[in-house]
Amino acid sequence: MSESFKIRKNGIDQIIYLEKLRSIQRSICKKIEISDLQDKTIKFVSGVDIAYLNEEAIIGIATFDFQNKRLVDRIIEIEKAKFPYIPGFLAFREGLPIIKVIKKTGIDSDIYMINAHGIAHPEGCGCASYVGVLIKKPTIGVASRILCGSCKIKPTKVGEWSPLNHNRKKVGAVLKSKDGCRPIIISVGNMITLEKSISVVKEFLKNGKLPEPLKAAHEIAVNERRRLVALNKK
DNA sequence: GCGACAG
DNA sequence: ATCTTGTCGC
């Protein structure tokens, strides 16, 4: 058999085979739409990030008004992390919790920026694509490091980017977002083009390495984590 | 066989 | 991701 690992689900031990997960990724990959948003107005953009406290996934979602770039909504939710982190299978650890929170809270943004890869993934289905396909919404993957593929020319000036290629195909962009920082990796999640993804991310770059929605989402999750840790010590 | 390896 | 202090560099 292929590589596998065990998880505890509803009090029952279960064996998970990576090959099975890959087949799920391949089937979701086929459903990814790489389309232009056309003139569909972008009103809200949400950033999604997760912080961990043992097996608790603290999910932070920051929603911004695309026009004035103002933070209009912040959400904190806790979900149990049922899967371990395995490079290439992040979607199974973070995807479902993220989808659950988006549905539970009724957030309805036009674009979701997710701290992960989209199609810049071995099976063409990173967590951002996984979430995008399942909620049928535009998503953009924004990561700090490459999972697979490579780029010939490293961008050096802030704002510059060069293509990330994998298997001779362009799967993303390596964007220099801040001086002194390694470039960030942007890829299509779902229902958007790479060009549009890059422009939306760039519009939200302020002083940080990451675009504001992700920076805010990270802050929300980490602050909640700190609060819970402090609360626990009392 | 040895690294590399999203969060 | 998370554990952690100082410290090198722009």
Image (tube, coloured by chain):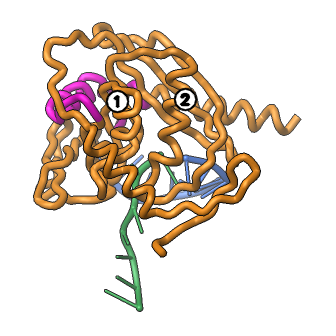
Chain colours: A orange, B green, C blue
Determine which residue is flagged by label 2.
A100
Residue beneath the point at 62% across and 30% down: A223
Residue A13 within the magenta-colored segment of the rendering: no
Circle 1 Cα neighbour tier, 10 Å, few/some/many (<14 / 14–19 / ≥20): many
Q: Quadrant of the C terminus of chain A?
A: top right
Highlighted range, magenta: A190-214
Residue A207 within the magenta-colored segment of the rendering: yes
Q: Earlier in the sequence, mark 1 or mark 2?
A: 2
What chain does mark 2 sit on? A
Under mark 1, the amino acid is Pro
Marks 1/2 same chain: yes
Q: Nearer the viewer, residue A32 or A214?
A: A32
Q: Is residue A131 above or below residue A200?
A: below
- Relative image position of residue A142 (x, y in whole percent): 33, 39
Q: Is residue A196 above or below residue A97?
A: above
| A223 sits left or right of A171 in the view | right
Residue beneath the point at 46% across and 63% down: A18
Secondary structure category for the residue under label 1: loop
Residue beneath the point at 53% across and 68% down: A4
Determine which residue is flagged by label 1.
A211
Circle 2 Cα neighbour tier, 10 Å, few/some/many (<14 / 14–19 / ≥20): some
What chain does mark 1 sit on? A
Residue beneath the point at 24% across and 29% down: A191
Q: Nearer the viewer, residue A164 or A160?
A: A164
Tags 1 and 2 touching, CB below 8 Å:
no
For residue A58, what is the image quadrant?
top right
Q: Report if residue A184 is visible in the image.
A: no
- Relative image position of residue A89 (x, y in whole percent): 44, 54
- Relative image position of residue A173 (x, y in whole percent): 19, 44
